[in-house]
Amino acid sequence: MLARPYATGRVGTYDNTTVAAILEYAPAGHIKSRPLLWPTLPVFNDTAFAANYSAKLRSLASADYSARVPMRVDRPFFFTVGLGTTPCPTYQGCNGPTNDSKFSASMNNVSFNMPTTALLIAHYDGNTAGVYTSDFPTTPSEPFNYTGTPPNNTNVSNGTKVVVLPYNTSVEVVLQDTSIQGAESHPLHLHGFDFFVVGQGAGNYDPSSHPAGFNLLDPVQRNTVGVPAGGWVAIRFFADNPGVWFMHCHLEVHTSWGLKMAWVVNDGPLPHQKLMPPPSDLPKC
């Protein structure tokens, strides 16, 4: 088996060598006489190859390992995912795309500000004022040609905004890459849940045509998915785990720039559907 990294966009120095491993299904001696087949690997930034490969992944969808895909959607969301800019402080140059701006990142043009009080504690105590607001946008406030020519104004807004969901809400999120500061693949990770990847494609998502091609039979189940460079991916999950759960890019620099948001899932009616209290030895920051 051979493998190498897949990378797009603004990448730094990394190990671009090929790793290899030998996998034997039978005891030694059975395969030594057979020819060694070396796969031909794509170049490190072959987005079409990566997207085509990812689209082939499936769940077992068997009696023992069923694919419990939400067939109806209570709450649909459309999130743009990508980079942007933030003006530099007055009289201070920045090492960004221009001398008067610095790199930022956002979802639906909201760059997440980390609070000084833990979101989970604020939610559990019911004291959310001044910690977070529940007005994270369900769709972009200013739609544009997401994978075409970027808008003139690439500045992001800032805030500690979340989405609040009733227990067991069926959720669909379309994650759309943008071309602002260059299209690239973003590995989006969701805490607290596994989701089903029901569709993906290149270019801009079309809500009138693309859902017809969604795989609701045996989609792959994951907690991290690569948003295709210059494309989109659709996921579905049941919000059946009460608490506060981050969704963020797994490229650490993008997370530090604000490419993250949080879901607040309220308690359900039954005892086992409640958020547990914090442990008695919870460290205080």
Image (tube, rainbow, N blue to C red):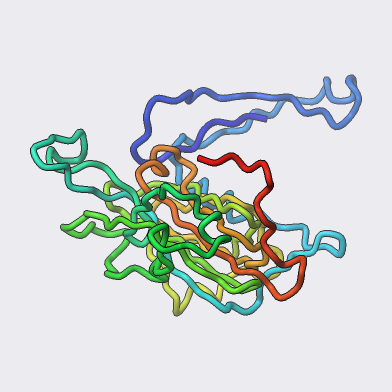
Q: Is residue 199 visible?
A: no
Q: Position of residue 95 (x, y in %)?
A: 20, 33
Q: If the image is split into quadrants, where does the N terminus sit?
A: top right
Among the 4 quarters of the image, the one containing residue 35:
top right
Q: Is residue 195 visible?
A: yes
Residue located at (34% from left, 49% from top): 105
Among the 4 quarters of the image, the one containing residue 257:
top left
Q: Is residue 5 left or right of residue 195?
A: left
Residue located at (55% from left, 54% from top): 121
Residue toward you, 209 or 171: 171
Residue located at (66% from left, 72% from top): 168
**As drawn, 112 above or below 99:** below
Q: Position of residue 82 (x, y in %)?
A: 36, 52
Among the 4 quarters of the image, the one containing residue 68:
bottom right
Q: Is residue 81 left or right of residue 200?
A: left
Residue toward you, 164 or 99: 164
